[in-house]
Image: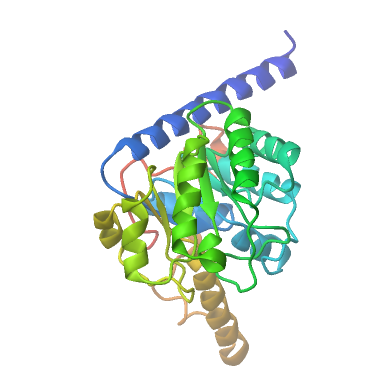
Amino acid sequence: MRLGDWIATQATHVMHDVFQQKKRRLKDLMAQQQAVPSLGVHDALSALVAQRVGFKMLFLGGFGVSASRLGLPDLNFLGLRDMEQAVGDLTAVLEVPLIVDADTGHGDLPHVRRTVQRLAAAGASGILLEDQRFPKRCGHFAGKEVIPVESMMDKVRVAVEARPDEGFLIVARTDARACHGLDDALERIGAYARCGADVGFVEAPQSVEELKRIPLETPIPQMANMLLGGVTPILNWRELEHMGFKWVVSPVETLAVCMSAMQAMMTTFLQEGSLENFMQSKATLGDLKDLLALERWQSGASVDQASDTGPHTLLP
């Protein structure tokens, strides 16, 4: 075997082993009784920070990718290739499972099949598939419409058939609450569960009472989306765990924090001429090098960018 072929073969084996480790970690997380708090990350750096701090599962949403990669709002500017590239960037440096926003599957049934296959090949540990009608909108934007429940059931069936194995998570999202009310949304989640969805997600419930009903009246584990500034009341993830939710996501706040921090830093530099005082107690160049495993990359040693000592902060 030629050296190049041998290297490629070894790399394939390593990636397969990493994927299997993530699959086992995801299975363990879903089997535990506790809820899983999670973040929506938007690029590889934010994902590395979240992993180092101690998050065990991460989410990559279309809002964050559209903003960070394109500088555009979540209005269908992203295509499957954009998400596939973003997923590959993140999973190449992550050792925790990444669940990926697949929107509506980027089309009809053939497109759903290809979306699942391509995102799985890029390293995703699962996808979130929704029942909005195209053109879709952010879940907390006005003007949403949903497709017939039978059409979404077909999409879920195809997604289940197309996934690489049963360890690949299928999260079925419904936006029916805004269009037809909570009862219809709950019925839809039940229908999607019968088609093989592993987790349900009722987007944008509008009260604490509605949140309480969701895990009680659905047959599969449920996700809660804690979007600050959205229509859903914001609760502590432990309160949601007590209600029965399995997965609690803060979806775009990493992006908002980055925006605020950069605005403050840039304004300070422009107005004061120096960042020396501003950067006190902030991450240093050394912290960045450590997060990115610079020395290990330079040495040619095996690079493990996950925290192997448990949660810790980047700052001294």
Q: Is residue 264 left or right of residue 213?
A: right
Asked if 79 appears above or below 3 in the picture, the reply is: below
Near-viewer residue (88 or 303): 88
Asked if 168 appears above or below 244 in the picture, the reply is: above
Locate residue 266, reporting x and y percent. 60, 81
Near-viewer residue (151 or 79): 151
Q: Is residue 4 left or right of residue 141?
A: right
Res 138 seen here = yes
Dividing the picture into quadrants, the one containing residue 205 is bottom left
Give the quadrant of the N terminus: top right
Dividing the picture into quadrants, the one containing residue 62 is bottom right
Dividing the picture into quadrants, the one containing residue 28 is top left
Locate residue 281, reporting x and y percent. 39, 72
Q: Residue at x 57, y 41 (%)?
A: 91
Locate residue 240, reporting x and y percent. 30, 59
Q: Residue at x 52, y 33 (%)?
A: 168
Q: Residue at x 48, y 77 (%)?
A: 229
Asked if 47 appears above or below 225 in the picture, the reply is: above
User: In the current view of this chain or complex, which residue is farthest to the bottom?
Assistant: 271
